[in-house]
Image: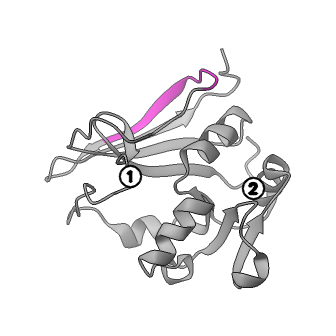
Amino acid sequence: MPPNLRRLRYNVATSLDGFIAGPDGEYDWIVFEPAYDFAALYRQFDTLLMGRRTYEVMQQRGLAPAAMGMKAVVVSTKLAPDAHPGVSIIDCGVHEAVAALKAQPGKNIWLGGGAMLFRSLLDAGLVDTVEVAVIPVLLGSGVSLLPAGERRRLHLEECKALPGGTLILRYAIQPNSRT
């Protein structure tokens, strides 16, 4: 990756058995970890890229990327841009739009939710890192961390255990690793 490109980082919580949400989309199992510095995490990004459902969950909870110091970019064919001021909506040409976003100056881009969006961007070679907070819970079923798709090799960059039992893992996507 050329040094002037921003990095697209998939940063998400997952259960130990690989689910990012429960069977009904619930996320009440994601425990607050006092040792985790969310403010430091947020400072690494200036853009939050997400799918429509993740955006709608954020809205329901009263959360806004702007409050985290980021602009919102939502991939959706259903949201009307006029109804969501302050949000950039990508409704077609997703891979090209994300590649153009990465080429703009700025901080890293947080790909924060949307397993299908993650898979699509991963298969297109646009995701640079996979960063998971493994929560010590077994859900048994739910929304998988990663739907089926191409095989990718990863390189471990960070592994940290927090006092509450959460594991923080960061993997770089290996270049030309689609074998």
Residue type at mark 1 is Asp
Question: Would residue 68 appear left or right of 88 to someone viewing this image?
Answer: left
Q: How many marks?
A: 2
Residue type at mark 2 is Lys
Local SS, label 2? helix
Question: Would residue 111 appear left or right of 57 to someone viewing this image?
Answer: right
Q: Nearer the viewer, residue 80 or 120?
A: 80
The residue under label 2 is 102
Which part of the image, by quadrant, shows the N terminus?
A: top right
**Residue 127 is a magenta residue:** no
The circle drawn on residue 161 is none
Local SS, label 1? loop
Question: Would residue 99 appear left or right of 141 to someone viewing this image?
Answer: right
Q: Quadrant of residue 80?
A: bottom right
Q: Which span of residues is magenta-colored? A: 149-159
The picture places residue 108, in percent across and down from the top left corner, at 62, 60
Instruction: Determine the CA span between mark 1 and mark 2.
Output: 33 Å
The picture places residue 24, in percent across and down from the top left corner, at 38, 52
The picture places residue 131, in percent across and down from the top left corner, at 45, 45
Which part of the image, by quadrant, shows the C terminus?
A: top right
For the point 57% across and 27% down, the residue is: 148
In the rendered image of this protein, does residue 26 appear above or below residue 142? Answer: below
The picture places residue 17, in percent across and down from the top left corner, at 30, 33
The residue under label 1 is 24
Question: Would residue 24 appear left or right of 67 to someone viewing this image?
Answer: left
For the point 54% across and 76% down, the residue is: 65
For the point 51% across and 35% down, the residue is: 146
For the point 70% across and 67% down, the residue is: 106
